[in-house]
Image: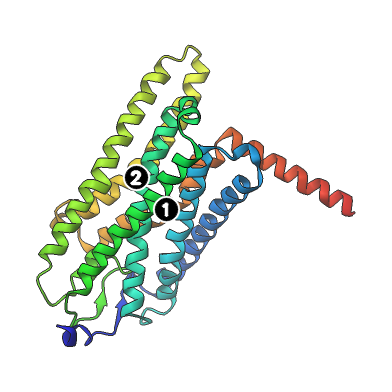
Amino acid sequence: MEKNRTMVTEFILLGFCLGPRIHIILFGLFSLFYAFTLLGNGLILGLIWLDSRLHTPMYFFLSHLAIVDIAYACNTVPRMLVNLVKPDQPISFAGCMTQTFLFLTFAHTECLLLVVMSYAICHPLRYSVIMSWTGCIILVVTSWACGSLLALVHVVLILRLPFCGPHEINHFFCEILSVLKLACADTWLNQVVIFVACVFILVGPLCLVLVSYTHILFAILRIQSGEGRRKAFSTCSSHLCVVGLFFGSAIIMYMAPKSRHPEEQQKILSLFYSFFNPMLNPLIYSLRNADVRSALKRAMLIERTKLMQRI
């Protein structure tokens, strides 16, 4: 088995087979989205770090969500952009396994962080009282540890398989299902572990998120002010849309019958939870928040004052 596995030392990521002109358009579009993702999440991290008013449990978790989103983008997008320009550029076996491990780690961690944040949004007042900084750190460390360990299990199960050709992955990154299709052995154990992991990391957290937002809905309905209800519903509906987009696309991708979703459709689904969601998260969770907007205004005022003093 070891001999067979080493027969494939690199893979070719086929990406989007749409022609050179479309590739150039996608390169420009995805580069723009990538820049927005890095700038948006980087801005959130900077504001939370610099403004002491944002040193609360809620924004502590938001900062880690921003870190996950930046890592998400940096793990997959640069390679995707290279493939749009040089479609035949190979990726090593070790590099592919590393990309798979990191992607799964960030995906699992984001699922767990979204559950914790949904409770924070549901109980903003009680949350600051109940949740100590020790509890926050424990939850974040647990989220990262569980995400990493589960990803490690998947990668170890992949490494036990022989890869003896072909070496073309029909995806824009080393997505686990696309990699498994190239294995020269039965992958039933991998498929079972993926399904069980999805139940615990996708279906379970999604149910908890929906329970939290059900409480939010009832709380909104009890608000006397019509304007207050509209603002609260607008904020929570935006959060729920992002969560639904992330969990929904991932569940369809990994739990729905594969015969109903051709490979090209699976690539589009992957874009939603691995690319568009990290770009939307800072806008939905942070930049529409009054506290973050106030922190941004204060930071801009401070920088403006410093600039005037230099002049």
Q: Residue at x 50, y 40 (%)?
A: 133
The kind of residue tagged 1 is Phe
Q: Quadrant of the N terminus?
A: bottom left
Identify the residue position indicated by label 1 in the image: 276
Q: Is residue 42 above or below residue 85?
A: above
The image's colouring method is rainbow
SS at mark 1? helix
Tag 2 and tag 1, C-beta contact below 8 Å: yes
For marks 2 and 1, the one nearer the N-term is 2
SS at mark 2? helix
Residue 11 badge: none
x and y percentages locating residue 173 in the rendered image: 34, 68
C-alpha separation, residue under disc 2 versus residue under disc 1: 9 Å
Q: Is residue 184 above or below residue 212?
A: below
Identify the residue position indicated by label 2 in the image: 245
Q: Is residue 172 visible?
A: no
- Residue 243 sits in quarter: top left
Q: Residue reaching furthest top?
A: 224
Q: Quadrant of the C terminus?
A: bottom right
x and y percentages locating residue 293 in the rendered image: 62, 38
Q: In the depicted view, which residue is nearer to us: 133 or 6?
A: 133
